[in-house]
Image (cartoon, helix red, strand yellow):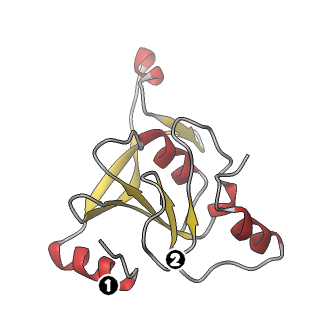
Amino acid sequence: MIAPGSEEIMKTRLKGYRPTDTIVVSLVGRVEVDNPQALPERNVKYDWRWVKGLDIAMFINATVDWRNTAMDIKQADPRYLCLWDVDSNRGAQILLQPVCVAGEDKAAEGLVISCGWYWRMDFCNFHEEDNGVFIRHNKVLF
């Protein structure tokens, strides 16, 4: 099952094309941007394979649980993935960081395994000027 709003993107991908704009995955409902939007419902497991190689911006706020969705999207190998907090107008790039784990720690919450390595989410906060650039580039209207 794919997230509502991503049907046209998926059809385009199946034809061998890809969107040139950053795709917005909004966990806060429809937002006022010109970019294509996917609107996943909370706590629903989706197939995110269509994001492979794309630039993705997840729109969140303090009231939504976004971590599982972010990890699922990151594991689908987008070219770029960032968070955008619509309340504070601040963003952060989402990265995966390899971690060493031993014995019982292998079941630690939030870790994924890929290529024999354990990974966890990490973040690189946008600088103040990058927050402004993000707003202007994506035509975010608040």
Mark 2, other Cα within 10 Å: few <14 / some 14–19 / many ≥20: some
Q: Position of residue 87 (x, y in %)?
A: 24, 58
Look at the picture and state if 40 lies above or below 18.
Answer: above
Q: Earlier in the sequence, mark 2 or mark 1?
A: 2
Picture residue at 30% right of the left edge, 61% below the top: 86
Tag 2 near tag 1, CB within 8 Å: no
Q: Is residue 119 visible?
A: no
Quadrant where the C terminus sits is: bottom left
Above or below residue 41? Residue 88 is below
Which amino acid does the dot numbered 2 rest on?
A: Asn
At horizontal 55% and vertical 52% (from top left) the residue drawn is 73
User: In which quadrant of the rendered view does residue 102 lie?
Assistant: top left
- The relative height of residue 60 versus residue 105 in the rendered view (above or below) is below
Q: Is residue 4 visible?
A: yes
> Left of 44 or right of it: where is 15?
right
- Pointer 1 residue: 136
In the rendering, at what x and y percent does residue 131 appear? 24, 73
Q: Which residue corresponds to mark 2?
A: 35
Could you give the CA–CA distance between mark 2 and mark 1, rounded to whole angstroms?
Answer: 12 Å
Q: Amino acid at mark 1?
A: Arg
Q: Position of residue 10 (x, y in %)?
A: 74, 65
The quarter of the picture where residue 132 lies is bottom left
On screen, residue 9 versus residue 71, left or right, reads right
Looking at the rendered structure, the secondary structure element under dot 2 is: loop
Q: 139 or 107, which lies in front?
A: 139
